[in-house]
Amino acid sequence: MSTTVPSGTCEDRTTPLAATRLLSAPLPELLAEAGAEIVDSSIRDTEFYGAAVQRRGEPIRLLLPTGRTARERDTMARVLVGKLLGTDLKPLPASLEARTYGGAL
């Protein structure tokens, strides 16, 4: 699995989000904290699980494919939010990869 996250996001946050909070807090709270929203993606590639896009002055959009289960979408949203908020994602399986692309937005 892979995800993409733009670099330079959530720069105003002074401390990273703890992994325990990332994995236990209700997803709507995490999305609000990150200033993110989930958007259905039309990408049908079986290797695509999600991406985060942030444009200056706009909310962060978590693009998640509609063909995934609710659990997969929840997990990918948490991974993307965790990456954006500086969470140490090392407890996650090595097969789950989050890559950062781009620069300051």
Image: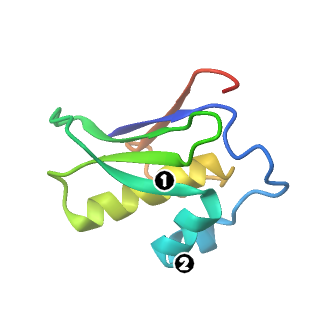
Residue 90 appears in the rendering: no
Q: Nearer the viewer, residue 40 or 1?
A: 40
Residue 83 appears in the rendering: yes
The picture places residue 55, in percent across and down from the top left corner, at 57, 33
- Which residue shows up at 19% across the image and 54% down it? 68
Q: Nearer the viewer, residue 69 or 31?
A: 31
Please name the amino acid that badge 2 sits on.
Ala
Q: Is residue 67 left or right of residue 27?
A: left
Q: Is residue 58 left or right of residue 79?
A: right
Outermost residue, top side: 102
The secondary structure type at the circle numbered 1 is: helix
Outermost residue, right side: 14
**What residue sits right under mark 1 in the picture?**
79
The picture places residue 41, in percent across and down from the top left corner, at 26, 42
**What residue sits right under mark 2 in the picture?**
25
Q: Residues within 10 Å of mark 1 (few under 14, many from 20)?
A: many
Q: Nearer the viewer, residue 39 or 51?
A: 39
Please name the amino acid that badge 1 sits on.
Val
The quarter of the picture where residue 1 lies is top left
The picture places residue 29, in percent across and down from the top left corner, at 56, 74
Residue 87 against residue 71 in the figure, above or below:
above
- Which residue shows up at 24% across the image and 66% down it? 70
Q: Residues within 10 Å of mark 2 (few under 14, many from 20)?
A: few
Residue 20 against residue 49 in the figure, above or below:
below
Outermost residue, front side: 57
- Which residue shows up at 48% across the image and 60% down it? 78
Quadrant of the frame with the C terminus: top right
Q: Is residue 101 left or right of residue 10?
A: left
Q: Which mark is residue 12?
A: none
- Which residue shows up at 34% across the image and 50% down it? 39
The picture places residue 45, in percent across and down from the top left corner, at 17, 32
The secondary structure type at the circle numbered 2 is: loop
